[in-house]
Amino acid sequence: MKVSLLLALLVFTGLWLAPMTASAQAAPTNSISQRVLTNVTRDTSPVAVPQPSEKAMSFYRSGNVLWGIRQFWQLLIPALFLFTGLSARLRTWAQRRGYNWYFTFALYFSAFTLLFALADLPLDYYAGYVRLHDYGLSNQTFNKWISDTVKYMIIFLGGGLILWWVPLLLIRKSPRRWWFYTGLLAVPCLCLQMLVWPVFIDPLFNKFQPLQDKVIEAKILALAGRAGIEGGRVYEVNKSVDTKTLNAFVTGFGNTKRIVLWDNTLRTLDEDELLFVMGHEMGHYVLGHIVKGILFGSLLTFILLYAVHRLSGPVMERYKGRFGFSTLSDFAALPLILLLVQIVSFAGTPIQMAFSRQQEHEADRFGLELTHNNHAAATAFLKLQQHNLGNPRPGELFILWRATHPSMGDRIDFCNSYRPWETGGTGQYEGYIKK
């Protein structure tokens, strides 16, 4: 549920991107600083791209199969709601019990969401719990998985009851221009989601706290100062309760913007590797990737909504006898909207993935220009590949439809080769960096 219906509905309301966050206070401990040492003489040798283990390749191949099943499943469920007439029957049931338009919507939406979640639950359970444990990538207990799943459901249901009636009302009031008005409303909705998610939603699933190692925190903040980021906020999160994989990310918007490090990452990478990873994340800040992402996501949302608008009429005209409705403003049309969103989103995924990969490549370049530590950057990616069971050279279809980042092989190669400062040249982003 949290990877299919949740994503599809957020996409429809314009929430294309992951949330972004802020605010760090002090806190004592030095558990990491005892293990992290600064290299007096930096290693400048190139780093070879390691061959993936058989376990990693198995994870890659089975992941591709699972992804294909997921794409089919996300089309099948709303199609079943439509072609069996179940959606129309739910609508009629809600009309008999709802004493006004909104409460009719609330009843229908709640019933539809719960049924969709139940249909999606077995696949979510296998993909998000069983498979990750089978490959040794998860620490999550079954109770934690259940708890997180229920929380996602409550958040999604509550958010849907607050937001989803708006586009349906716009469809009802302006059948020809609803897609344009909905697209306009999606922009502030996206900004609001990015603003509040890190503060109110993320902490429901994991514990976020200021970086506990004050030695490495001081070095990260000094690096942030060189990148022109004053008062930077760096958090660590106890993701080790859920996973054995490594990650770091930028989250939040405006006053809630922050850099988040998983505790696994802090324990696994050495100091120089951590500083490069931080330099990469700072690159997202400095290069305006959050704002660019909002603008790009907003443009895609307008295109998506317009495509749904144009496609829905012919589909309803052809199948109105089977569907039990003939207008998109009918509550029973919700599965049709989801189905069209999935189809159009799938067609546009390569564009979205290419945009994401370009931003990640720019952040890699910024991190290298900020730290001038190519070897540490390459070994950081090597550890990410090995701990996350990555395939450093995935196939073209994987890159087109699934890769939000450049492949680990390409990133390590870039770290080995990109060093213009060693031949008297200047970096692309040196104007952003204080000497």
Image (cartoon, rainbow, N blue to C red):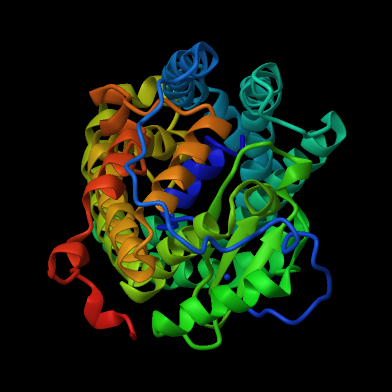
Q: Quadrant of residue 103?
A: bottom right
The reply to whether residue 309 is visible in this rendering is no
Which residue sits at x=48%, y=78%? Answer: 224
Q: Is residue 417 left or right of residue 95?
A: left
| Image spot of residue 54 (x, y percent) | 50, 11
Which residue sits at x=70%, y=67%? Answer: 200
- In the displayed structure, would residue 362 be above or below residue 434? above
- In the displayed structure, would residue 227 be above or below residue 301? below
Q: Is residue 211 left or right of residue 61?
A: right
Which residue sits at x=54%, y=38%? Answer: 5
Q: Is residue 162 left or right of residue 400?
A: right
The residue closer to the viewer here, 173 or 122, is 122
Q: Quadrant of residue 348?
A: top left
The residue closer to the viewer here, 416 or 256, is 416
> Which quadrant is the C terminus positioned in?
bottom left
| Image spot of residue 427 (x, y percent) | 19, 69
- In the displayed structure, would residue 309 be above or below residue 21? above
**Which residue extends farthest front?**
41
| Image spot of residue 225 (x, y percent) | 46, 85
The reply to whether residue 180 is visible in this rendering is yes
> Which quadrant is the N terminus positioned in?
top right
Q: Quadrant of residue 167?
A: bottom left
